[in-house]
Image (tube, rainbow, N blue to C red):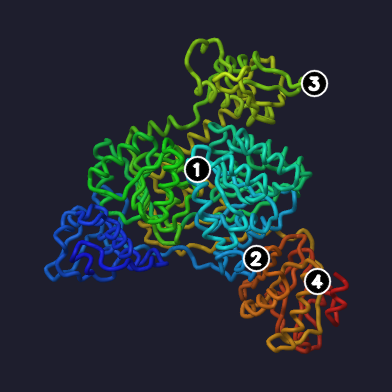
Amino acid sequence: MRAVRTGSAQGPLPPRPRETWTPAYAKWRFLACLAAQQPGATPDLDEGVLLRQVVRWSDVPPDVGVPASSLAPAMAAAGVRSTPSGRLVADPYAPGWLARERVDPRRGLDGPPLVRRPAEAIPGEPWLRSASNHRDWQSLAQKEAAWTALTAPPGSTTLVGLPTGAGKSLVFQLLALRSTGLTVVVVPTVALAIDQCRAVREALGPAAASLDPRYFAAGDADQDPDALVAAARSRACRLVFTSPEACVTGRLRGALEEGARTGWFMNLVVDEAHVVDTWGGHFRVEFQLLGALRRRWLAASEGRLRTCLLSATYTRECRDALRSLFGEADPASWREFVAQRLRPEMDYYARAFGSEPDRDRAVLEALARLPRPAILYVTERAEATRFLAALRDAGYRRVESFHGDTPPRRRKELVDAWRDDRIDLMVATSAFGMGVDKADVRAVVHACQPENLHRYYQEVGRGGRDGATATCLLMPTPRDRRVARELAPTLLGDEKLRLRWAAMWRDARAVPGTDGDIHDLPTGARHDELMGKRSFGENIRWNKRLLLLLLRSGALEVLDLVHEAPAGGTGERRTEWVRAKLAFPGWSTDVAALVHGQRDAELALAARGLGLVDAHLDAADSVAACRVLRRQYGLGVQVACGGCRICRAEGTLPPAPCLDVPADPPARAPRLSLVLGLPTPGTPAGDEALAGCLQDLARAAVRRFACPAPTQDSLARLLARAFPGDGRVIYRIDAPHPGEGSRFAVAPDEHLVCIHPGMPDPDLLAIRRGRAVSHILCGGASAYDANGRLPLTAEGARPFPGVDAWLQSL
């Protein structure tokens, strides 16, 4: 490596390797860092850490000769040394303070990444290839999730769960692309909105231009919110990423209501939908109000608006809460596809420290050894600022911080730089990372204690999205645990509940024409003990917490959030009212009795969440991380581990299972048909006859096909001739696994057509799902057995001697 000998980049930077876990990729990152430094500048610690990554990921020690003297300080700080023969070496990073974690001394925490995600890609249909930059589905589960959402009827709600990195974003990207109207994607953070807007252009390629994707951020100097609203109204923009606040109380609301009335607003997508339950219950009332507004938009659209909820992590309680908010009385309007698997890429390590100075020294030591890109998570904004200063003082140049006070324009700059590999280390609070899809993150360090296991799992989930291992290091102090306890929902005592409700009811107003059933409740009401005190926003937040607690207890239904400008147009802030339908007499001040059960349940849930993090940290706890996580997400989640101290002690590293495709048992036996008379495909005459049959099926709105795997490509080519190539009309081709039958799902109302190009395929013949299963037996005589009988006739399958008669029966 001439770059090491000279201390500067040599020649043009090579292309970025596609595989981000290889030695070639480590070399590319090192060279990119050298190329980005100012002319004449001395290499910083960034170069030392990246050079260490090259050494640790290489099969044999790199032979570089004599390294440049300018690199010597950075190399020494990162633990890299040169042998007398000119080779670079670095010992595996296995610190003594992690002894109980059973670190493999040969690999350490910084060994070459191992690809742990199973190879489960399957061929994509021609329409997918024409509509996006994807040739394959990442997995059968991703294909099922997309099909479930794309075939959802008008007015329905579809809940989709796919693991982090399994491609759930493609679900709403395709949903927007094949719709003719507006799709609104509600996201919890500005960072995610920026990231998703960029990702859709990468995923869909030229097809994204027809969507004109944009994100709504009121404080972003690079975005004009009024221009976005105008584009949505004029139908120039068909895909918008935005916050719940913009939909509920912001400038988008009017445009969405108008779009619902005119049929232009077609799809409401809630990405990272688990936050509706985990955040919305205590902090952001707008997440809860989305459900109420969605019902208004659904009614205005005359039952046409479709809703899609997406997340990687659902608990059973979360799914139930989402159904109560976004479901309808008709069970048929609710659809679920949830394939959850614990992340197999995570290598978990944890150590609780007794003091902050000891922990901080260990953090700096670890970050000088761990591979890049890396994220250092903290809980408080002040901690993000403090660690950023410490890292820059230590000699890092390619490090930044991202937290709740980061301005919108700066957020966009940071997300772009992070994705473009101009930042190697991000110091962040939970404001960063929710769904931000950077595939090659190799280390996630927590210099804090998350308040629950759900937050921790979400944040370590930023690592290893390319399917290779990522190091996850949890390093809290006693102070961090106190902060975590304080972040748990603090719920009001009985007397404060009564005082706050009495103040809101005192200033409430009945909505005309509702017979006193519906009231506007002021969120800014102050009870007597607060009169004269400067509580401002904190008082409003506590009032909202009370209202949400009543909502979750079933004591009221939130219908709307109303804002009124002050009379006379003065500079005073607007008055906010929550419009609600009460299930109890409002004059009653004993609201505490109404919420006791819900309040106790939420406190117990918060304590359980913190307890699960403690279980992960506890040296005496002999439960593996995968089992702790299974406590969180339920028995329905597929276990995948091998990366925690218990699994390392057991010496097992089982391969991660392919994602299960949950399939409900058929409600009734499908109608079976046998179709004869087509010649064997593979010849011009056979292909032409089958192509004509497929064109007739396309006109009959048959969209489901299956065939043996070896003939899938040839059938795909024939289907591409039968269906339009613009991606608007979708169809499916599936193939059973030999000897395993069909792992793919078939909905109860679907008609599946199985193509048998030669001998009847036993795995296809065994399918008993859907409304009807028709088998096209090509080749004539080969369809009969030795006794001259057709398959399935004993089960009542109806034979058709030719295609025309069968088509007439459809």
Give neighbour class at mark 2: few <14, some 14-19, many 20+ (Cα, 10 Å). Answer: some
Quarter where residue 732 is shown: bottom right
Residue drawn at (60%, 20%) of the image: 569
Residue drawn at (41%, 34%) of the image: 484
* Of the two numbered discs 1 and 4 in the rendering, the one whose residue sits closer to the viewer: 1
Circles 1 and 3: CB atoms closer than 8 Å: no
Q: Give amino acid for label 4.
A: Leu
Task: Give whichever of discs 3 and 2 has the lower sequence position.
Answer: 3
Mark 1: which secondary structure? helix
Give neighbour class at mark 3: few <14, some 14-19, many 20+ (Cα, 10 Å). Answer: few
Quarter where residue 688 is shown: bottom right
The reply to whether residue 276 is visible in this rendering is: no
* Of the two numbered discs 3 and 4 in the rendering, the one whose residue sits closer to the viewer: 3
Residue 86 place in picture, x, y as percent: 15, 69
Q: Name the residue beneath numbered marker 1.
A: 190
Up the image or down, 486 lies above or below 611; here it is above
Circles 3 and 2: CB atoms closer than 8 Å: no
Task: Give whichever of discs 1 and 4 has the lower sequence position.
Answer: 1
Quarter where residue 277 is shown: top right
Task: Give whichever of discs 3 and 4 has the lower sequence position.
Answer: 3
Q: Name the residue beneath numbered marker 2.
A: 744
Q: Disc 1 to disc 3, how far (Cα)?
A: 41 Å
Q: Disc 3 to disc 4, how far (Cα)?
A: 57 Å
Circles 3 and 4: CB atoms closer than 8 Å: no
Task: Give whichever of discs 2 and 1 has the lower sequence position.
Answer: 1
* Of the two numbered discs 2 and 1 in the rendering, the one whose residue sits closer to the viewer: 1
Q: Name the residue beneath numbered marker 4.
A: 672
Quadrant placement of the C terminus:
bottom right
Mark 3: which secondary structure? loop
As drawn, the label of residue 515 is 3
